[in-house]
Amino acid sequence: MNKESLLSFLYKEREFDILTLEKNDKKNLKELLKDRDIKNKQLEIAVNNIPNGFENIINNLEKAIQEKLEIENSINGYFSEKAYKEGFFDAIKCIMRCIDNENNNEHKRN
């Protein structure tokens, strides 16, 4: 199994745990989630205030916003996965260096 396959496998194994919002996450994200809810409500109000007869514009606007959000989420997901895999790979390399150093020190003592 190559590096990328191994990292993908390990990421998929941990993905649910990583993406589960814990109590600490909610605390850390509290202000951002509050701001997001406010902005969502403001957007909803703005769309609802578009006069009748502009249903086509409303539908196109809602579709464009949804598609933009999906793209942004995909981009964020890509970089989150990349950061996780790189961090994990760096940790493995660090552990391997420590083991190598310990083995080298052991050989020097003998």
Image: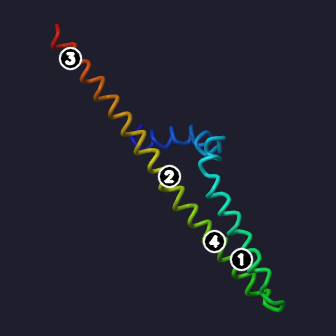
Q: Specify the label residue 105 is tagged with.
A: 3
Q: Nearer the viewer, mark 3 or mark 4?
A: 3
| Residue at horizontal 50 percent and vertical 38 percent from the top | 10
Looking at marks 1 and 2 on the same chain, the residue that comes earlier in the sequence is marked by 1
Q: Do the residues labelled 1 and 2 touch (CB within 8 Å)?
A: no
Q: Distance between the residues labelled 2 and 4?
A: 20 Å
Please tell me how crowded label 2 is: few (under 14), some (14-19), or many (20+) other residues with Cα within 10 Å: few
Q: How far apart are marks 3 and 4 (CA)?
A: 57 Å
Q: Distance between the residues labelled 1 and 3?
A: 64 Å
Instruction: Identify which residue, 108 or 1, lies in the foreground.
Output: 108
Name the residue that disc number 2 marks. 80
Q: Which amino acid does label 2 sit on?
A: Ser
Provide the secondary structure element on which disc 4 rests.
helix
| Residue at horizontal 33 percent and vertical 33 percent from the top | 94
Q: Nearer the viewer, mark 2 or mark 4?
A: 2
Provide the secondary structure element on which disc 2 rests.
helix
Q: Do the residues labelled 2 and 4 touch (CB within 8 Å)?
A: no
- Colour scheme shown: rainbow
When the figure is inspected, residue 110 is found, relative to residue 31, above or below; the finding is: above
Give coordinates of residue 57: x percent, y percent: 73, 87
When the figure is inspected, residue 39 is found, relative to residue 97, above or below; the finding is: below
Please tell me how crowded label 3 is: few (under 14), some (14-19), or many (20+) other residues with Cα within 10 Å: few
Name the residue that disc number 4 marks. 67
Q: What residue type is labelled 1?
A: Glu
Provide the secondary structure element on which disc 1 rests.
helix
Give coordinates of residue 109: x percent, y percent: 17, 10
Looking at marks 1 and 4 on the same chain, the residue that comes earlier in the sequence is marked by 1
Looking at marks 1 and 3 on the same chain, the residue that comes earlier in the sequence is marked by 1
